Amino acid sequence: MRVLGVDPGLTRCGIGVVEGGPARRLAMVAVGVIRTPAADEVPLRLLAIERELEAWLDAHRPDAVAIERVFAQHNVRTVMGTAQASATAMLCAARRGLPVALHTPSEVKAAVTGSGRAEKAQVGAMVTRLLRLDAPPKPADAADALALAICHLWRGGTTNRLAEAVEAHRSGRPPQIPRYTGTTRTPAREARQ
């Protein structure tokens, strides 16, 4: 499965595409940041984000889009811009009929590092390790977008199982049924070993 992760923001919107699955090796397909000038009007900034997201969707053809869930902050202006960028990503995905998943920051941190309270540096380090990169993607928005995609691949639940069943059906092979292994170790904890 291929997932486009979006770390929404008006000034910097992190985007990253990861391929893999719960029991499959992860691979980074692409990573980047959409930047818009703070001096531009909000509608123009959203239009720039929409155009770039559409180009990424065309180029990388993800099976799903994972977006960071907007949470309340003290700065209302920042929350509004983040929510607007998030809505733009949802619109782009919906236009193509792609499933959209919203993941909280702590859910993403827990999926990637094993701790929902991990610092940004820890997330960047684990993304680097899990995707076998030479260095953490910069800026942190790019690493966060990859972490969102990884989180969705590992925790996508029903969406992932449905996509795998459809793929198995199309290829004529029986779907794989997950088996209880007697362990509660997460993929992130396995990767740290």
Image: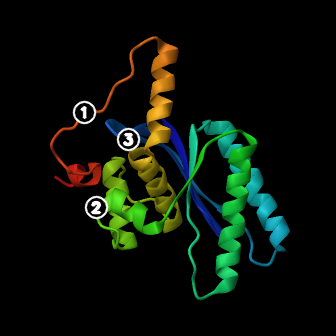
**Mark 2 and mark 1 in contact (Cβ < 8 Å)?**
no
* Whether residue 35 can be seen here: no
In the rendered image, residue 70, in percent from the top left (x then y), is placed at 59, 69
In the rendered image, residue 48, in percent from the top left (x then y), is placed at 78, 59
Q: Crowding near pointer 2: few (<14 within 10 Å), some, many (20+)?
A: many
Q: Which residue is mark 2?
A: 114
Residue 65 higher or lower than 43, as above or below? above
Residue shown at 48% from the left, 65% from the top: 104
Decide which of 30, 156 is in the foreground and name it: 156
Residue 159 lies left or right of residue 59; in this view the side is left
Of the two numbered discs 3 and 2 on the same chain, state the one appearing first in sequence: 3
Decide which of 185, 44 is in the foreground and name it: 185
Residue 127 lies left or right of residue 189; in this view the side is right
Residue shown at 38% from the left, 46% from the top: 154
In the rendered image, residue 60, in percent from the top left (x then y), is placed at 60, 38
Q: Which mark is residue 26?
A: 3
Residue shown at 37% from the left, 56% from the top: 127
Of the two numbered discs 1 and 3 on the same chain, state the one appearing first in sequence: 3
Numbered disc 2: secondary structure? loop
Residue 151 higher or lower than 181, as above or below? below
Q: Which mark is residue 159?
A: none
* Whether residue 44 can be seen here: yes
Of discs 3 and 2, which sits in the foreground?
A: 2
